[in-house]
Image (spheres, rainbow, N blue to C red):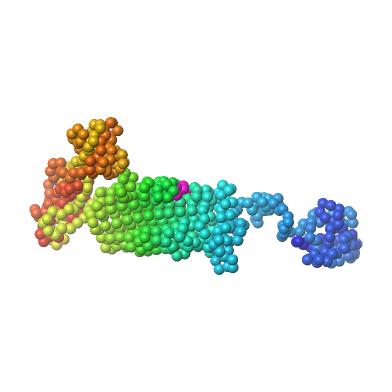
Amino acid sequence: MASIRLSEFDTWRPGYGLATVTIVRAGTDSLATVYSDEDLQNVAANPQTLLGNTVGETSYGKWSAPLYVGLAVELHIDTVDRTGVIRPAIDDLEGEDGSDLLVTVDGGSEAYSLAERLGRRIDARDYGEFVEVGVVGASAATNSATLQAALGVAGAAGGGFVELPPGFYTVNPFSLAENVVLRGQGRGATTLQCNQASRVATIAGPRAGLSRLTLDGVSVVAGSVGLYSVANDQIVLDDVEIKRFAASKHIRGGENMVWEKLYISDCADGSKLHGDTDAGDSGLGKRLGNVRWIGGRIDLCSVTGLDVRNVDAPCGQITLEGVEFDTNTGTALSIIGARGVTVIDPVFVGNTVDLEIDDGSPLDGDNSIANIRFLRGRISGGEMELSGTLESVVFQEVEIDDVDITLTSPLNNVLALDCREINDVTLAGTATAWLRSRTTDKGESFGVTTSNGATKAWGIELDPGQRVFLTAKVVGRQQNGTNDGFYFVAVSARRPGSALAYDTQTGNFTLGAILTGATSGATGRITADADGGATGTLTLQDIDGVFVDNEIITDGSGGSALANGALVAANVALAGTNEEVRAPQETNANWACAFAANGPEIELRVTGDTGQTVEWTVEVEVVSS
């Protein structure tokens, strides 16, 4: 029981000499029990007669000894005066209901009931023991029971933050219901550890997630996943570190997410962002899109730091801003079959492979690479591996330092716009597909010849049915002599449509209609039909996807048959001859410049002379249909 000292007459009070003071329970006339000690053990007299001391004409009164009570009281003085209610402080509610007690926070002005005030915040420690590593009684089972109880309260309330204290805590796997966010005291301040070969934190509804904590798999256990989600939108990850798992997080579909200060460290697969139907498990996955990751780092991952992938559902509209990729021994960033990925102000340093970009496999209408953009930032050391469709892949204002770039079978050029290449940047594979451009110079490529053979200086692969008009401005300058040459040439070129044989025709095809493969989903516009009755051959352009043998093909206008084999592509051909827009100006008549067809490509070839080292700068403008 809390005690309070009755201090009203601890000192001499004028006008109260020898007064009788009766101490009653607040709001009653019943005498209160009064004590002479703070521990409320020694009962004192009640009423009390004050000591008296007269000075001049004034009589002063005071207690003869200190007095204490353990409940609210009032003082009645000579049955004439009375004080207000004197209340002891509350320090024990055992056996009492304090729900309606009013409390005001220190420095605040509004009073609320104790029940309302405490109900505003869910703290895991209110629901059981939550014991830090190294303290007697610490166990994953105990901590998990407490954690699940707190998470259950938040879930039943429709959501909320579940607060965790600072420290290191072992836990078993847990799930986060809709709108429930587990929040610690800061990344590195609150750490949850689980070294099981399982999914530790499972997102079980939209707007759930983690905040201000570290999730630690301890020893990269095979099969361990830090955070796992299937088809949940608006996942919360704020000031979070996930480390030492086989996969830090695996997201199989979801949309509309903004993550800030997310750190991934020392995993096999750092982070998997997948458009994935989860066909082999729940079958409930979906597309992944509209994800924005702002700030943070991915480091020390041995397989892939960040894997952005169309597994079997679209994956795109993903923005990474200010994310660092550091010392990953595998591939730092892998973009496979995704579209609409923007990487702003990244830093790649110390990685074995900085970047991998490629189409999905098998290629279909949704997983060819398109619209990948890197804006500013720095890529230092390591390799870049760029393959496949590479439609609208752009590096803009990026500093590229000592990087080995390999372009493998690119269907489109990769634009390096206003980039700075320093310290032994190398190009391998189809190097001419790396198109350097400055906003003041348009696009140009650069190469050196040392003989009199025609050498490819620029090239582009045409799609089936594509037509182009090309102009080239070319400058040649001899490095080991004074010769030079200036050329301005133009040419037209075409690539015929691809041929698709068919049989078992049940309806005639219509020129100009869109052909669709029932199995592959591939499409193409019909430009010609060599119809032999039940069999024939279609010519297609504007092709998207890959038709498969023996699938049903229809044109939406009654035409129908079975595909007989694969598409057969045609080669590019010049439409006319090279024309000189302006007569060449050259000091060596053996030098030359001309467009030429080569398989699916149209190339610009330059010719120098034997024994002469000539550097060629080429700018080509393409008008395409």
* Magenta-colored stretch includes residue 99: no
Residue 155's x, y, as percent?
Answer: 56, 49
Q: Position of residue 435 (x, y in %)?
A: 25, 52
For the record, the magenta segment spans 230-234
Picture quarter containing residue 106? Answer: bottom right
Q: Residue at left 59%, top 66%?
A: 137
Q: Is residue 369 visible?
A: no
> Who is closer to the viewer here, 241 or 269?
269
Prevailing secondary structure class for the magenta stretch in the rendered image: loop
Residue located 80% across and 63% down the image: 68
Q: Is residue 128 above or below residue 532?
A: below
User: Quarter holding the C terminus?
Assistant: top left
- Could you tell me which residue is drawn at 25 percent across and 60 percent down? 426
Vertical relation: 62 (above or below) 510: below
Q: Is residue 386 left or right of residue 48?
A: left
Rendered location of residue 295, percent (x, y): 43, 56
The spot of residue 348 in percent (x, y) is: 36, 60
Q: Residue at x 86, y 57 (%)?
A: 31
Depth order, front residue of 489/2:
2
Q: Nearer the viewer, residue 317 or 451?
A: 317
Residue 483 seen in render: yes
Q: Which quarter of the image is occupied by the N terminus? A: bottom right
